[in-house]
Amino acid sequence: MIIVFTGNGKGKTTAALGQAVRALGRGRKVLIIQFIKNFESGEHLFFKKIQALSFGTKIKIIPAGKGFVKILGDKLPLSEHKKAAQNALKLAKKEILGGKWELIILDEINVAVGLKLIKAFDILKVITFHKSALVVILTGRGAPKSFIKKADLVTEMKEIKHPFKKGASAQIGVEF
Amino acid sequence: MIIVFTGNGKGKTTAALGQAVRALGRGRKVLIIQFIKNFESGEHLFFKKIQALSFGTKIKIIPAGKGFVKILGDKLPLSEHKKAAQNALKLAKKEILGGKWELIILDEINVAVGLKLIKAFDILKVITFHKSALVVILTGRGAPKSFIKKADLVTEMKEIKHPFKKGASAQIGVEF
């Protein structure tokens, strides 16, 4: 099953994290690969903590990006972001085919495709090849058409109101 | 801060659960009151489990509803649903004013208002009275206009594609 969370509104990554919560509650194994993020986020801290408690082999979260791309003061050459995204893609493919996980979240992969760091087809062919009970969630604004076409479930998170528009800044524990 | 997740698409409750994950990762205290649900969901099982581990006073999840209202074979008199929602509302008010929690999720409260089980104003006056660092998330389709007006952040989860439309049924660990 392929789920896509896209759109310009808040709630794409968090909806995926909520799916992780549900799956873990049911005893499923969950892998989260973050394509853009490299920093310690609230979700990273949380899942690392419960992993250390008793969810050892049930949950893994990997921030595999190099941070924001071409925004918010990013000065890293695009080639570096591309290398990181290619490595994240390679890892994602391996883990999908490995068959260990029951839910795999590829966070911000839509953005990575939009920035041409990776190709949509490269991940789709692996997911669609692997037709099992596996649930794959693809998040990020601007989901490529091929993702939407192949997906079983697509939600557009549409921004109706956002405090950033009024000049508020990102809040720790809310935005990351 | 008031956040509203509404719309007909999948991802409203899960986006709120994801916010809970982020907040817990940052050491915040999180309360979840579910207005419609009464059954054991994946999120309920998960948060009960981590509560027992080491998040004892940091997380509480309370399914305070009586199950689906007027759909999916519900035969309970509306008065029973109303009583449950009124009790959930009373609890929510008490906990908001108590000041213990840093994130409070009122899951499906939009639906409870839409079904006239409770009044939007009754919860709004308490939330807006309590102007602090508290984050309140109101979820459910058909959010009342007053919620949207008062909210700092609103996302509409818009259904683009959903397997239920093709006759698939709700999947354990995905839908609940």
Image: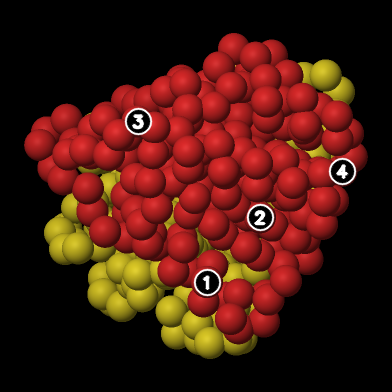
Chain colours: A red, B yellow
Letter of the chain that mark 2 sits on in the rendering = A
Q: Is residue A165 left or right of residue A132?
A: left
Identify the residue shown where x is 77% and y is 31%. A126
**Mark pair 2, 3: CA separation:** 26 Å
In front: B118, or B93? B93
Does B148 appear above or below B37?
above
Q: Which sits earlier in the primary sequence, circle 4 or circle 2?
A: 2
Identify the residue shown where x is 65% and y is 41%. A90
Query: How dense is the environment of label 2, judged by Cα within 10 Å: few (below 14), some, or many (20 and up)?
Result: many
SS for tag 1?
Answer: helix
Q: Position of residue A24 (x, y in %)?
A: 70, 63
Identify the residue shown where x is 68% and y is 75%. A55
SS for tag 2?
Answer: strand
Letter of the chain that mark 4 sits on in the rendering = A
Identify which amino acid the numbered label 2 is placed on.
Leu
Identify which amino acid the numbered label 1 is placed on.
Lys
